[in-house]
Image (cartoon, rainbow, N blue to C red):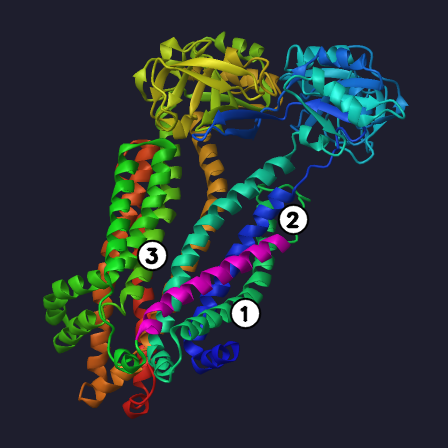
């Protein structure tokens, strides 16, 4: 059977190459996405900060527990966005356990140099957890002393100064010199009491333990507790004893202690998993559509060959196995081509992600063995199943009827296809209703499901759609193209089933291009528009190192300042159907917020925003089912559980975040107790005084609020690059597959065109007939695909903004419609022109 399948493939090089191309491109995309997922899943953070600790007690994540319908317990673990904390007193209790040699608490104290370079601040005792070795001077003892790692402050940074006040020009700071650091949003001067060798570890600033406790953003809690065991101690038993008193914190071994370190690598791993899995899932569905259509069309064009095989006594099972063997052979060859190309594409994609800041330098990329195997398996299964489905009809015909069946256009599709199409159409309409009626993530999920269901319905109902369209378009085509139009409409009716794959490909291209691509435009446009229209403040004081409470007081004391609203960006975690969902939060001082920000409140009032209260966006309120007056359970960024009452629901969530909490409620629960910006409503007369305040706090700047919107647009553009890249991959694959399908369909018409030319139809009339057919198919495809795209886009935009009218950039609309027209015409007219250059007598006796 394998030998026969191989000969059949050589006998049909055109359809074989077309199928191979579709499978190879699918393997390439799946492999690239799989490498991203594999890299994220296989990433295991190596300990750096706690490399010398035998055990680390920390709380890097939080777990939600729910009960399934069958009574089974379901647990969802989510990384804490601000990093969890453990009680400071835990260190003393661990120190009393037998077998413990040393215990040190560790805290992340945000420190910046005057030029804005961030440095981690720590208490000196925690240096043993890395370890850092003191190579010059002594440990810090006073509040005005620090120890610097040898790579912490290079010369020329502007931070290290000599006792005479001059900036040093040495390669590093020296013991006895002074250093200026921004700590707690305030520029302070410290004396360098010593230098510590970092051994290749991250640069750090060490304070005295007492001063570190004062500077720490958390009160009564620390980021982690490191434990160094005594020589010969049983670490397993010691870990059990520590775990008994650790409460809900985790006890991590040295190998796993990297999980307690908040690093960019960990965030990158989560991003790669999310991106690869989500887009890989969409690509799998696309591949199923494309492969099924391509192989199905290939089998249809070979029905004369297959009928002959049936006529010479081949059994239905043998025909099916032969076609499945052909599909399997093609999938193996396609994987051999596509998988290596996908591995190369994954490396290029990772390099781009690194250059644009999504992935840090040196992030370990998986070799892709599992991704390659998974992509090969998906391609193989998809091709074999598609071959089985395509072979069912021809293999089920009686041998005596096979040749007669093959010589004419098969009868219209059966009842099963009709019923399946109606079911898909009803499901798509239901999803459309859910997307419009619901909101939030429910609407987003329903809209994406609606897109695929509508395309599936079109694919199943395409023969009947083609017949109806041919009848409706017949007068128009006859008017536009004359006799050629009459032939085109007759051909569309007669070849309704054969044109189904072409129609589906065009609808898929228009539907995806017109919905998924324009979605990003709407997100960017709405976010910037909401930010600009909602910002009542005229100025903003911003600082990368953060702004302290004293700065807020100074700003409010300036004559001409009507209101000043400090804003701190953080996140909370909430439970959604048992899973933990991270939600962006803006913590603000509610006093005078109505004068600086207009959130577009639709229900409730911001006047009630105080401790124990929250305002939420319409999107999140709809997603979680929250209403004004309802108490909801949240976990702050450090894992602290709180219950807040919803006092307002607002419309401008894209511009101002999904949750607004009082700033006072976040004190001690974020990685820094500093504000990211201060929104200021003031008269122009206050500008001079505000600039003086900004100059007095290094790293801060007074900017126009329009600049904030511009910065938001830049941030969105950065994330949009990744979305658009992956969207281009999806739409590009769809377009290539559509072109592939239409070229196959065009080249398969050589006998039909030869018959027409031998009966007196001129080459010009044939070309006009083909043009008329493509105009008819293109018009139907644009109408159906445009409707699907409009419904999908409107549903998503309504879920995010409340508006049913999406923004469609004119150039983008021209690109989608013009590109589809060029695709439909070029991939048909050019192959037909090639066929017309050959004398018809040479084609009349050839296979389809």
Left or right: 240 in relation to 657: right
Sequence-first disc among 2 and 1: 1
Q: Residue at x 33, y 56 (%)?
A: 508
Can you tell which of label 3 and label 1 is closer to the viewer? Answer: 1
Q: Is residue 418 visible?
A: yes
- Residue displayed at 31% across by 65% down: 501
What is the magenta segment's predominant secondary structure?
A: helix
Q: CA distance from mark 3 to mark 1?
A: 26 Å
Write the residue at 29% across / 92% down.
841
Q: Residue 333 — which label? A: 1
SS assignment at label 3:
helix
Question: Which residue is at a point 46% across and 45% down the rendered structure image?
Answer: 723
Give left or right: position of 802 versus 30. Answer: left
* Residue 743 painted magenta: no
Mark 2 vs mark 1, foreground winner is 1
Q: Which mark is residue 508?
A: 3
Res. 268 image quadrant = top right
> x, y percentage for residue 365?
65, 48
**Quadrant assignment, res 504:** bottom left
Give the mark nearest the N terminus, 3 or 2: 2
Measure the alpha-carbon separation of dots 3 and 2. Answer: 33 Å
65 vs 508: above or below: above
Do the CB atoms of the residues marked 2 and 1 lie less than 8 Å apart? Answer: no
The picture places residue 575, in percent across and down from the top left corner, at 47, 25
Q: Which mark is residue 365?
A: 2
Residue 206, compared with residue 77, is above or below; it is above
Rounded to the nearest whole Å, what is the CA distance between mark 2 and mark 1? 26 Å
Q: Nearer the viewer, residue 144 or 392?
A: 392
Mark 2 secondary-structure assignment: loop
The location of residue 218, given as percent across then percent down, is: 64, 14
* Span shown in magenta: 369-397
Image quarter of the C terminus: bottom left
């Amino acid at each position: 059977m394998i030998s026969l399948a191989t000969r059949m493939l050589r006998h049909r090089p055109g359809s074989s190459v077309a199928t191979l191309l579709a499978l190879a491109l699918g393997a390439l995309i799946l492999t690239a996405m799989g490498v991203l997922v594999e890299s994220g899943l296989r990433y295991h953070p190596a300990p750096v900060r706690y490399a010398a600790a035998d055990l680390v007690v920390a709380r890097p994540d939080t777990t939600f527990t729910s009960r399934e319908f069958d009574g089974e317990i379901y647990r969802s673990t989510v990384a804490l966005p601000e990093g969890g904390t453990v009680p400071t007193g835990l260190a003393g209790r661990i120190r009393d356990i037998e077998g413990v040699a040393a215990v040190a608490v560790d805290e992340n104290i945000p420190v910046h140099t005057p030029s804005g370079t961030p440095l981690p601040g720590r208490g000196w005792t925690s240096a043993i957890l890395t370890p850092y070795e003191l190579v010059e001077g002594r440990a810090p003892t006073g509040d005005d002393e620090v120890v610097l790692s040898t790579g912490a402050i290079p010369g020329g940074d502007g931070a290290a100064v000599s006792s005479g006040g001059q900036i040093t020009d040495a390669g590093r700071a020296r013991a006895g010199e002074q250093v200026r650091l921004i700590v707690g949003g305030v520029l302070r001067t410290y004396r360098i009491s010593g230098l510590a060798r970092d051994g290749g570890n991250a640069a750090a600033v060490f304070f005295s333990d007492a001063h570190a406790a004062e500077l720490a953003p958390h009160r009564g809690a620390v980021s982690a507790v490191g434990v160094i065991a005594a020589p010969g101690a049983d670490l397993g038993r010691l870990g059990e004893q520590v775990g008994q008193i650790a409460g809900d914190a985790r006890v991590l071994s040295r190998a796993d202690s990297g999980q307690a370190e908040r690093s960019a690598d960990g965030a990158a791993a989560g991003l790669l998993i999310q991106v690869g899995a989500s887009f890989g899932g969409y690509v799998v569905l696309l591949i199923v559509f494309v492969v099924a259509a391509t192989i199905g069309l290939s089998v249809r064009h070979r029905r004369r060959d297959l009928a002959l095989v049936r006529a010479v006594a081949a059994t239905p099972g043998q025909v099916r196995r032969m076609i499945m063997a052909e599909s399997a052979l093609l999938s193996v060859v396609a994987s051999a081509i596509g998988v290596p190309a996908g591995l190369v594409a994954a490396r290029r994609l990772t390099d781009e992600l690194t250059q644009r800041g999504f992935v840090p330098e040196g992030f370990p990329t998986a070799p892709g063995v599992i991704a390659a195997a998974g992509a090969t398996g998906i391609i193989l299964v998809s091709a074999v199943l598609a071959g089985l489905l395509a072979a069912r009809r021809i293999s089920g015909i009686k041998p005596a009827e096979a040749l007669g069946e093959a010589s004419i256009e098969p009868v219209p599709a059966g009842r099963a296809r009709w019923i399946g199409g109606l079911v898909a159409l009803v499901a798509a309409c239901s999803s459309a209703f859910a997307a419009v009626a619901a909101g939030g993530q429910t609407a987003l999920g329903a809209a994406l499901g609606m897109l695929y269901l509508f395309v599936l319905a079109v694919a199943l109902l395409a023969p009947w759609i083609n017949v109806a369209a041919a009848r409706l378009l017949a007068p128009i085509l006859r008017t536009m193209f004359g006799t050629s139009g009459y032939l085109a409409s007759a051909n569309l009716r007669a070849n309704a089933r054969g044109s189904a794959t072409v129609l589906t490909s065009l609808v898929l291209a228009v539907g995806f291009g017109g919905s998924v691509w324009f979605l990003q435009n709407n997100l960017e446009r709405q976010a910037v528009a909401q930010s600009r229209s909602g910002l009542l403040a005229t100025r903003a004081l911003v600082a990368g190192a953060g702004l302290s409470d004293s700065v807020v007081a100074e700003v409010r004391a300036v004559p001409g300042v009507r209101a000043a609203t400090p804003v701190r960006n953080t996140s909370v975690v909430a439970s959604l159907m048992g899973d933990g969902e991270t939600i962006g939060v803006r913590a603000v001082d509610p006093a005078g917020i109505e004068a600086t920000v207009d959130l577009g409140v639709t229900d409730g009032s911001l006047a009630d925003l105080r401790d124990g209260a929250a305002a939420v966006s319409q999107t999140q309120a709809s997603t979680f089912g929250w209403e004004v007056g309802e108490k909801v359970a949240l976990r702050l960024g450090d894992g602290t559980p709180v219950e807040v009452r919803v006092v307002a629901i607002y419309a401008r969530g894209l511009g101002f975040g999904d949750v607004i909490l009082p700033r006072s409620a976040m004190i001690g629960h974020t990685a820094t107790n500093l504000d990211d910006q201060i929104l200021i409503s003031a008269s122009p007369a206050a500008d001079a005084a505000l600039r003086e305040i900004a100059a007095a706090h290094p790293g801060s700047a007074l900017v126009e609020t329009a600049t904030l919107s511009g910065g938001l647009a830049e941030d969105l553009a950065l994330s949009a690059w990744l979305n658009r890249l992956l969207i281009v991959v999806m739409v590009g694959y769809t377009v290539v597959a559509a072109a592939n399908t239409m070229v196959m369909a065009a080249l398969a018409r050589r006998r039909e065109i030869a018959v027409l030319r031998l009966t007196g139809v001129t080459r010009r009339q044939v070309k006009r007939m083909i043009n008329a057919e493509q105009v008819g198919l293109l018009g139907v495809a644009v109408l159906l695909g445009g409707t699907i795209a409009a419904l999908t886009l409107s549903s998503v935009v309504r879920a995010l903004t409340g508006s049913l009218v999406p923004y469609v950039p004119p150039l983008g609309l021209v690109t989608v419609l013009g590109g589809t027209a060029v695709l439909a015409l070029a991939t048909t007219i050019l192959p037909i022109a090639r066929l017309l250059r050959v004398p018809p007598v040479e084609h009349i006796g050839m296979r389809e």
